[in-house]
Image (tube, rainbow, N blue to C red):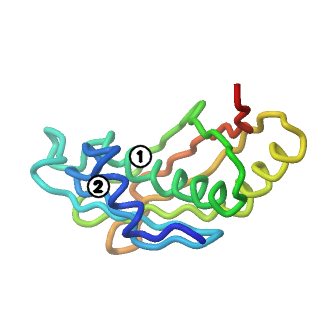
Amino acid sequence: MSLSPSKINTFLFFKLPSAWWCGVRLKEIDANRASVSVKHKWFNQNPFKSMYFAVQAMASELSTGALVMNSIRAKGKPVSMLVANNKATFTKKATGRIYFECLDGQAIAEAIDKTIATGEGQTQWMKSVGKNEDGIIVSEFHFEWTVKLKYKR
C-alpha cells in the first residue's frame, strides 16, 4: 500500500512541525513522482520579501523524501534513509505559490532494491525543481539520499 498525501501531511504535523507551520504540503505522489507546494507568506519570508531558502529546502526535500519513504514502504523491508549531501541553485525570487516536483522514484526504487539484495548501503542523487505559478523555475535542489538495510541487534 502506497503513501497518500494526507498520511504524509499528518506525518509532517507530528514529526516535522516547522515544515507544516510554514505551509509545506505534499500534493501528489505515485511510484515515480512527488509534488509538494508551499505558498509565500509573511511567516515564511526573508527580509527581501520572498520565500526563505530554508522553506524551499524543506519543500524540495519532502518531494524527494516522500518518494524514498513510499518506495521503502512498497518493498516491505526495514530500510533506513538519510540525506548525506545537498546542493541548491536559486534563479528567481520565490513569491506566490511554489511547486516542487521530483521525478526520481524509479532511481531510488532501484537503489533500495540493490541495498536489499546485497545488504550494502546505497546512495542516490535525487532532483527537485521548484517552479512558481507561471511555470518559471525559481530553484533547483539535489539531495543525495543514503539507504541501508536495517539489521536487528
Q: Are marks 1 and 2 in contact (CB under 8 Å)?
A: yes
Residue 90's disc number: 1
Most distant residue in the left direction: 42
Most distant residue in the right direction: 118
Tell me the residue that label 2 is attached to.
94
Circle 1: residue type: Phe
Looking at the rendered structure, the secondary structure element under dot 1 is: strand
The alpha-carbon separation of the residues under discs 1 and 2 comes to: 9 Å
Looking at the rendered structure, the secondary structure element under dot 2 is: loop
From the viewer's perspective, is residue 37 above or below residue 113?
below
Task: Give the quarter of the image for residue 72.
Answer: bottom right
Is any part of residue 131 visible from this angle? no
Classify mark 2: residues with Cα within 10 Å, few (<14), some (14-19) or many (20+). many
Most distant residue in the front direction: 153
In the rendered image, the quadrant that contains the N terminus is bottom right
Image spot of residue 57 (x, y percent): 40, 44
Image spot of residue 46 (x, y percent): 18, 41
Residue at image x 70%, y 25%? 153
Q: How many marks?
A: 2
In this orientation, which residue lies closer to the viewer: 18 or 54?
A: 18
Image spot of residue 113 (x, y percent): 81, 53
Residue at image x 24%, y 49%? 51
Image spot of residue 98 (x, y percent): 33, 63
Is any part of residue 29 visible from this angle? yes
Q: Is residue 27 left or right of residue 106?
A: left
Classify mark 1: residues with Cα within 10 Å, few (<14), some (14-19) or many (20+). some
Task: Give the quarter of the image for residue 130.
Answer: bottom left
Most distant residue in the top direction: 153
Residue at image x 35%, y 61%? 9
Circle 2: residue type: Ala
Q: Is residue 140 left or right of residue 54?
A: right
